[in-house]
Image (cartoon, rainbow, N blue to C red):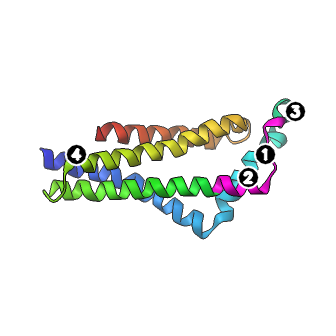
Amino acid sequence: METLTLLGQALLTAIPAAWIGVGVIENIRFPPVNGDLVTMVMRMDRVREERPEIYEKVKGNRIESPRAHALAYAAIVGVELLATVLLGLGALLLALAALGLAGPIFARGLAAAGALVFTMVWGGFLVGGQWFHYWAGWKDSQFTHFFLVLWGALTFHILT
């Protein structure tokens, strides 16, 4: 039964590793795609356009600095890369542990650390998004980020 559990944990860790890994690759290959979205959220563009009555009250939260936008985007991609590496190595070690070639405790710990970093990325978007009131202009993104926090938390729970 332990072999099946380890293989299941490897698969359940490999899926978010692959998903966020593709995101990291695309963020590096095509920075303007998501980088422009980060800028728009930080400038509160959509809130200004879609909910001007809210924007007028909270516009002091916006950040206009292109340097701050670039630094925020680089930090996001860096943390996503860390999550990818931890989850990917964790998944590999879990598979090796199922074969008796690695220690399951270390493998689970590494994978769990990856799940926490994965969760931190999306939780950070929720917290940062709250500051920029992105719920008023980016509702779909907020729902997606809630889902991704739950995915990371569930993966962590399965590993611990």
Mark 1–mark 4 distance (CA, rounded to whole Å): 43 Å
- The alpha-carbon separation of the residues under discs 4 and 3 comes to 52 Å
Report the residue at 80% width, 46% height from top.
45
Residue 62 in percent (x, y) is at 79, 41
Mark 4 and mark 2 residues within 8 Å of each other at the beta carbon? no
x, y (%) of residue 78? Answer: 54, 57
- Callout 2: helix, strand or loop? helix
Q: Earlier in the sequence, mark 2 or mark 1?
A: 1
Which amino acid, by three-letter code, is at mark 3?
Glu
Q: Nearer the viewer, mark 4 or mark 3?
A: 4
Task: Name the N-terminal-most of marks 3 and 2.
Answer: 3
Residue under label 2: 68
| Real-space CA distance between mark 4 and mark 2, rounded to the nearest whole angstrom | 40 Å
Q: Which residue is mark 4?
A: 105
Give the magenta-colored segment's residue range.
60-73
Question: Hey, what amino acid is under mark 2?
Answer: Ala
Give the overall secondary structure of the magenta segment: helix
- Circles 2 and 1, Cβ within 8 Å, touching? The answer is yes
Amino acid found under the numbered disc labelled 4: Ile
Mark 1 Cα within 10 Å, few/some/many (few <14, many 20+)?
some
Query: Mark 1 or mark 3, which has the lower sequence index?
Result: 3
Above or below: residue 57 compared with residue 125:
above
The question of residue 147 being in magenta is answered with no
Contact, mark 1 vs mark 4 (Cβ under 8 Å): no
Would you name the residue on which mark 1 appears? 63
